[in-house]
Amino acid sequence: MISMIQLKQVLRNRRFVLFTILLPLAWYMFLYNIQADMLPNIMLGIAVFIGIIGNSLATFSKRISSDIGFYSFESRFSNYGIKNYLLDQTFVQIVLNTLIFVVVLGAATVFAKFPINGKLGVQFFLLTIMGIYFSVIGFVLGVRLDAKLIDTVGFPVIILAALTIMPFASFGAESGFISLVAKVQRIFPGYYYTNMMNAILSGNGIQLKDMLLFITTFVLNIIPLYFLVPKVKFSKAK
């Protein structure tokens, strides 16, 4: 019930439509026009990632920060604790991220003749996992920071998150900075997402090493975030 209410509220939010639906579409068309030699699925992944990151680290985190006072009050009179809240919000995020994927894919198919094939199923699954990853980060930001502070730090956090998943190697640049960023990316799951997608798109199977590193980095990144979530029912000073 709470999930459905939250979902309806988000879909009526113009900020969500602008920053997490229209912006990814603009990114896809931008990449399509300047990187014509880039694989279509890579372009799709980048555009969807932009939407997922914006949804998770901007819209979602601010929503959590704004609503947590109400759910903190509710938790005093019910068994609805932080685990229930996180699970409900994760479900909402999965639905919203799926919507982002479908909208970008639909536009890519109509305007850029995007090829529909079975590889999209694997890509959708991997993007869903990455969506959960960024949603957990957004949830932690929401329960730890107030809405005004999130507005202040939101853009820098989004830029940092984008740097962890942008496949710089695909751009053909080899400067010292690009090389450094590529090395730092290896401690985040987005790097291995790109490796697995490249393997699939080139006709090769996913390497076990990349799959294990994807899972390992996902877990190792989530563990410290878990300890940043309050263990008691909601109690955040406003």
Image (spheres, helix red, strand yellow):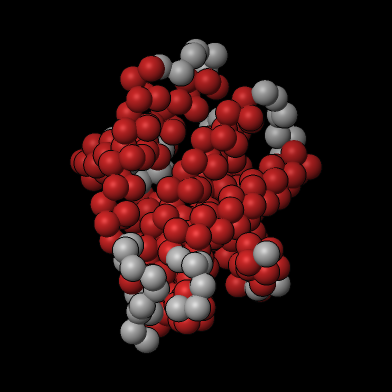
The quadrant where residue 110 appears: top right
Given residues 124 and 179, the one toward you in this image is 124
Q: Nearer the viewer, residue 171 or 140?
A: 140
Q: Quadrant of the N terminus?
A: bottom right
Residue 152 versus residue 166 in the image, above or below: below
Residue ranking furthest to the top: 204
**Location of residue 36 in the rendering, given as x and y in whole percent from the top left corner:** 58, 36
Question: Residue at point 45% right, 78% down?
Answer: 76
Q: Is residue 182 above or below residue 71?
A: above
Q: Nearer the viewer, residue 59 or 70?
A: 70
> In the orientation shown, which residue stands out farthest toward the bottom?
238
Determine the residue positioned at 39% across, 57% down: 137
Q: Tell me if I can see residue 217 in this picture.
A: yes
The answer to which of 173 and 140 lies nearer the viewer is 140
Q: Is residue 6 left or right of residue 146?
A: right
Q: Quadrant of the C terminus?
A: bottom left
Residue 97 visible in this rendered orientation of the protein: no
**Percent x, y for residue 146?**
38, 79
> Residue visible at 44% across and 32% down?
194
Q: Going by the image, does 35 lie left or right of 76?
A: right
Instruction: Classify 118 as above or below 172.
Output: above
Q: Is residue 213 left or right of residue 37?
A: left
Q: What residue is drawn where x is 60% and y is 36%?
A: 124
Quarter where residue 26 is shown? bottom right
